[in-house]
Image (cartoon, helix red, strand yellow):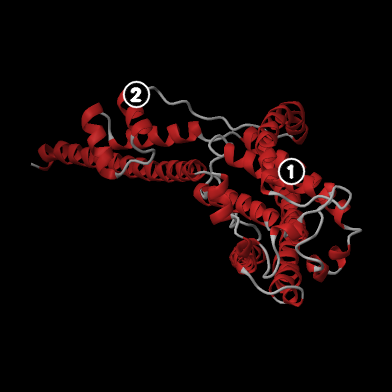
Amino acid sequence: MEAFFNEWLWKEEYWLPPGISWQDTEMKEEEGRFPRPRDLLFSLPLAVAFIALRYVFERCFADPLRKLFGVEERVRIRVVPIPKLETFYTQNTRLPSQSDVLSLGKQSGLSQRKIQTWFRHRRNQDRPSRTKKFWEATWRFVFYLASFTGGLASLINTSWFWDPSECWRDYPKQPVADAHYWYYMLEMSFYLSLLLCVSVDVKRKDFKEQVIHHIATIFLIGFSYCANFVRMGTLVMLLHDSSDIILESGKMFHYAGWSWLCDPMLIVFALVFMLTRLVVFPCRVIHTTLVLSLDFFQPFFGYYFFNALLLVLQALHVFWAYLILRMIWKFAFMGKVERDERSDEESEADDDEEEEQEEESSWDQRKGTMNSKLASLADNCVLNNLTNQRSISRLPKAR
């Protein structure tokens, strides 16, 4: 297996500039640490430790904070157990089609409306609680805040923090400081823990995109570490953590019902996102890796691959920026944001609950209209009967 990796995966032309071999990257202990792929194995037990720490954090810190913020649960209707409907719900789909409703109606003897109402309440019953959402947002907020603070403290005195072209000086023989090594390990372990917990976390509409995002992030961190793009990688992680802090804190305020604070947080998040992802990232990061790096080495496979990944990431930034600007547009001209345009859309059950309220209100309106029509019809019938009786009683006199 080791011979296979050395022959096919760890070829020098894949990972190193032309004219440089693996022997040239070897360092003595006093010179510092050179990143090795086996270092990434430490992130696996660290990810498990993150999961255990999160469990303790949510119950010992996030829950008291939830009570302090006044996050309350909504009252939900518990459905009456119906075996046939429950079997269809768990084994087939949570959103039955019209033909499925007709078929279930024949099997259970229930009306279509009762079946649709049962499925709607059943979905809302499985909807994640506000407590769970608040716990998750608090955990991520604390991590991003600690990661950004620690990353900034470890980078602010480095030469490449102020001059990104220094990321490539003496490349690839660049020692990795212990602080930057732990910065990498903690970031990778955190996203590994998110990937392992994705099935039990709050399931949103962009569930598949979340899984792809976590895998891509882990892949990017791992690749940049193995290729010793650590200096540039630390800058990329720092830029992304800066806006994620504001995003997660905004979620916390949203779940607490602090609407007066959510709107300013939206503006601040949009400004930070635009500045870091659409200005600093392309002008300082991509320009440095794509153009300035050629002053220090000749292009090789790792150069093309790493820049391709960064360009894909920038394309995603442009897409998210479009959605955020659309949110700002709604906020400016409608006075509020009706729906989160970014990836934090809640599960389908949230929409079901709103649809249910709308349907119930429209049903009440229709029922009120129907009752008024029936009442007027009944009055007309009574008036007609009285008129007929009076005409009949007057016939003998007329005769």
Residue depicted at 65% across the width and 37% down the height:
44
Q: In the image, is 124 to the left or to the right of 290?
A: left
Q: Quadrant of residue 45?
A: top right
The reply to whether callout 2 and callout 1 are in contact (CB within 8 Å) is: no
| Up/down of 172 relative to 92, above or below | below
**Residue picked out by circle 2:** 82
| Up/down of 81 relative to 342, above or below | above
Question: Disc 2 or 1, which lies upstream in sequence?
Answer: 2
Q: Mark yes or no: residue 384 visible.
A: yes
In front of the other: 176 or 133: 176
Q: Secondary structure at mark 1?
A: helix
Report x, y in % for residue 327: 62, 62
**Residue picked out by circle 1:** 186
Q: In the image, is 10 to the left or to the right of 352?
A: right
Crowdedness of circle 1 by 10 Å Cα count: few (<14), some, many (20+)? some
Residue depicted at 75% across the width and 54% down the height:
265
Measured in 3D between alpha carbons, the distance from the residue under mark 2 to the one under mark 1, in whole angstroms, is 47 Å
> Mark 2 is on which residue type?
Ile
> Mark 1 is on which residue type?
Leu
Tell me the quadrant of the picture where the N terminus can be found. top right
Q: Quadrant of residue 377?
A: top left
User: Given the current orientation, which residue lies at the most extreme left position?
Assistant: 399
Q: In the image, is 124 to the left or to the right of 366?
A: right
Report x, y in % for residue 365: 42, 45
Q: Secondary structure at mark 2?
A: loop
Q: In the image, is 338 to the left or to the right of 23?
A: left
